Amino acid sequence: MATSTGEVEKINVRSPFYLTVDSEGAPSSGEPLPPDYNPPSTLTQPLPCGEQINIGEDVGTRIYEVDVTDRSGDFRINYTIYTPIKITYQLTEDTSPTVIGYRGGDTREEELIELGIPPSELTNLASGDFDNSYIQITRTSDAESTLTITIEAPLDTDEYRLLMQCPDITSAPETVFSLPPTPPTDTNLLADSQTIGFTLQVFSASLVPDSTSMSVYINDSLVSQISPASLNLNLLSVTPSIIFTNISSLNWASLVTPSKIRTQLPIVVDNSSFKVGDNKIAFKLNWDTSVFDSQIFLKLMEFIRTGIFRNTTDNEYQFAWHNYQGTYSFYGFTDKYDTEVRNIANSSQLISEDVMYSFIYNTTTKNVSASTDTNPLPMYLSGESSGATGGIKV
């Protein structure tokens, strides 16, 4: 316990807390003193979009990093600053930083000048104890990028707050696709309809419990729960197919599609949460393990890069299939190796109940690749014998 002779001292230069200390318990003569705490001169920390930073007391330099990948538009750094700080920012794609300069109240302007800061750098200080405003940054690209905000605090900063406001993640074009009001007269893929789908094939339908359902996730959010009656993974006559789209009630291309695929309509999973660039897609199979084993053997999964076209013979819109594309003039492409309609497969795999398996789909390249999660689906390029027509880049 502190005595009446105790003095109030700061723990360290970056701490807003104080301890009351006295000479009791101090090392005796000849004993080594504990090392002083020397805080780093620069601290770097993430600042997620939508979050606020509150600093109660600080000196030195802090660097805040904002992930702005897949976002474009106006970004705003809202601030309330008391003791002046210097602000600089830079996007990854910028060739040089943008110096905003000193912001805050002018009541301690003389102290800054005494530290050697030229008065010409202090002309934007607000009159009074604090400054409350914002910095706006406009970005036109959705490419991978980081916004770096550097805060230099030459004086003991009694308070500043930063609130990072960002535009929403840019949605992929296929999330707002709509069928044209006038049916086309060719079999070309409709612009912005290109999307991803996959089929599930089991070793034997008799080895799949009737209760098997599927949960589907996009970027870690549950977007669909497919019932056993809709999945039909236990029927020998059906190969379930799942399509990520906002258009429902369409079938696969007729004439060229295996009958097990066309036995039921593709199961549509809403793709409205797709963002531009990489998207993690994951699924879990669930069943009653009290009446069946804890694993199901999948013989094959085919990931199909597809799109919507107008079958002018059937006079209806359908999902393009990757086999025998010449039937539909390669859906408007030069040949089967150029078209967006490709496929990739993953090898046979034991699927455990209630375990999430994931892969990556890129809405820009339309490619599928392996995930880095705990249970990624191993993939390989499917050969012609499996119906591949060029494959999807991995």
Image: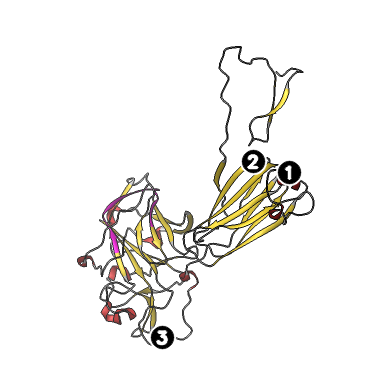
* Residue denoted by label 2: 59
> Mark 1 sits on what residue?
111
The amino acid type, in three-letter code, at marker 3 is: Pro
- Residue 56 is situated, as x and y percent measured from the top left of the image, at 68, 41
Left or right? Give the position of 187 relative to 165. left
Amino acid identity at mark 1: Glu
Q: Position of residue 368 (x, y in %)?
A: 35, 61
- List the residue tagged with mark 3: 184
Any part of residue 9 in sight:
yes
Q: Quadrant of residue 194?
A: bottom left
Report if residue 353 lies within the magenta region.
Answer: yes
- Nearer to us of marks 2 and 1 is 1
Q: Residue 103 or 160: which is nearer the viewer? A: 103
| Closer-to-camera residue (80/117) | 117
Q: Position of residue 324 (x, y in %)?
A: 25, 76
Q: Residues within 10 Å of mark 3 (few under 14, many from 20)?
A: some
Residue 340 magenta-drawn? no
Q: Is residue 241 visible?
A: no
Sequence-wise, the earlier of marks 1 and 3 is 1
Q: Tell me how far mark 1 sits from mark 3, CA to CA.
A: 73 Å
Marks 2 and 3: which is nearer the front? 2
Q: Overall secondary structure of the magenta stretch?
A: strand
Residue interval drawn in magenta: 344-359
Whether the residues at callouts 1 and 3 have beta carbons within 8 Å, the answer is no
Mark 2 secondary-structure assignment? strand
Q: Residue at x 53, y 67 (%)?
A: 140
